[in-house]
Structure formats: C-alpha cells, structure tokens
Image (cartoon, rainbow, N blue to C red):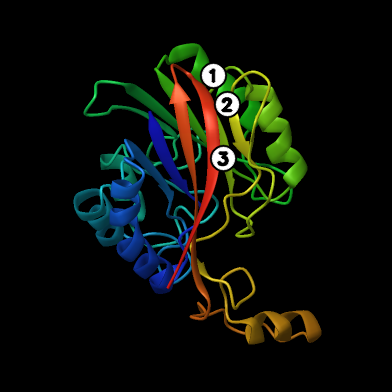
Amino acid sequence: MRILCLGDVVGEPGRRLLETHLPELRREYAVDFVVVNGENAAHGHGITERIASDWFQNLGVDVITTGNHAFDVKDIGTYFAKEPRLLRPVNYPPGTPGLGHVKLHTPGGEEVLVMCLMGRVHMPTCDDPFRAADSVLMKERADVVIVDMHAEATSEAQAMGWYLDGRVSAVVGSHTHVPTLDAKLLPGGTAYVTDIGMTGPYESVIGMKKEASLARFLSVQRAKFEVADGDLQLHTVLIETQGKKAISIERILRKL
C-alpha cells in the first residue's frame, strides 16, 4: 500500500501547490491514501469548511490533520463535529469538538487508521500524547496505522517515533514547517520523519513574510503576520507498507 503524507499547507500559496501537484502525484506514484495537515490552510491560521470540503471532494484527500491552530477559524468546531475525516489532536481535553482519530477503508479494502497527536513541549496545554496514543491503540485495530505528530520539539517527535515503533506503520512530524533529513525506517518497521516540512512559500520565515518576523525579533513591534508568496515548494513523504509494517519512506519535492 502507498500512502502520501503532506505537512502543513500554508495559506493560498500552499493550497495552490496542493491543487497543482497532488493529482499528478497520485497518478505518478499510484497512491492509495492521502493524509494532509491543513491547520494553516486559511490565511496561515486554521482551516475553513470550504477548503476542507474542496480537498475531500475534488483533490482526493482522505484525511486532514491539524494541531494547535485547529480552531482558529470562527465556528469551525461545528464542522469538526460533523466531519470525522477532519481531525484535531487526540490529546485535546475531553469535550473538544471533533475526533482525534479515524478509521477508513481504501478502495482495495484495507483498513487505515489515522491518528493526530500534539506535543506538549513549547506548545499549548494539552493532555499526554503518549498515553493518548496508547488509549487509541488499545481500542482500535487496522491494517495500516498513520500518526501525525504535531510537535515543536524535535526530541518529543523522535521520542514518539521510538515509543510507537513496531506498533504503527508511520509516525510523521508536522508543525515546525522545516523539512528534516531523517526520513527512515525504525527497527520495528515504523516509517519515521521528524518534520515533513510545509507546503507553501519558502522565501519566508516558516511561511510568513520575513519582514514581519524580523520586526518582531528586532523590536518590540508586533508586526502583523501575512503569508509570503515566494519560492513555492510542496514537501511530502511517500510511505509504502507491506502488511502493517512500512518497507520504505521517500521524500518528494515539487515546486511552482
């Protein structure tokens, strides 16, 4: 089975990249399942029902994961509550709208479980992601299990990879918007990467116009963040599984 996982899609430039390249990637690599992190899709913060619906209906995205910006768009909680394929982190507090994991079937009949977790180091307050992962895996079984680990600290993402090695098919990192060079297979058969990297403008500071970020670092001014639009790159990893174990993980880059 072939699974395509994309990190944070940032603003309109990221959406443009996705619309341009995802259909051809699906064909070129004979992709069976697509997971996209969409928490920055709407102007760099959050996601709207219109964007998510378009990805599901027109681009063939199977599951959209999020993270700390999941609920930035007003009233999006209503859509989380009714659309199980749009995930917020499992380890958000009880009573949060929506689900943190979902199990779907591919056209070939395989069961795929996708789980969204959020780290706690330098992140908003949330429950323990390690115990949250255990809780899901105690209740759910599937042919393939994909985990989006939305974490600021590389150490926490790596720890989750080792913690789940052999129990899930893949642990793929998101959130930092910076692609890492450590895509690999762990000894237990779990594909791992600390951060897939964003799909969006790389002539920027993590997707935002660099001038605003520099102003914030160099003075007390709280300059408004705006999505940049230079050096557009789509970053993704292609994971191939045999049974529940991963047998390969490959980085793919596309540009506009």
Up-down relation of residue 234 to residue 85 (above or below): below
| Mark closer to the chain start, 1 or 3 | 1
Kind of element beneath mark 1: helix
Amino acid type indicated by mark 3: Val
Query: Image point 61% across, 77% down: which residue?
Result: 204
Q: Which residue is mark 1?
A: 135
Q: Nearer the viewer, residue 192 or 79?
A: 192
Circles 2 and 1: CB atoms closer than 8 Å: yes
Q: Position of residue 100 (x, y in %)?
A: 44, 35
3D distance between C-alphas at marks 1 and 3: 19 Å
- In the rendered image, is residue 226 in sight? yes
Question: Which mark's residue is nearer the viewer, 3 or 2?
Answer: 3
Q: Residues within 10 Å of mark 2 (few under 14, many from 20)?
A: some
Q: Nearer the viewer, residue 116 or 232?
A: 232
Q: Which residue is mark 2?
A: 132
Query: Image point 20% across, 54% down: which residue?
Result: 58
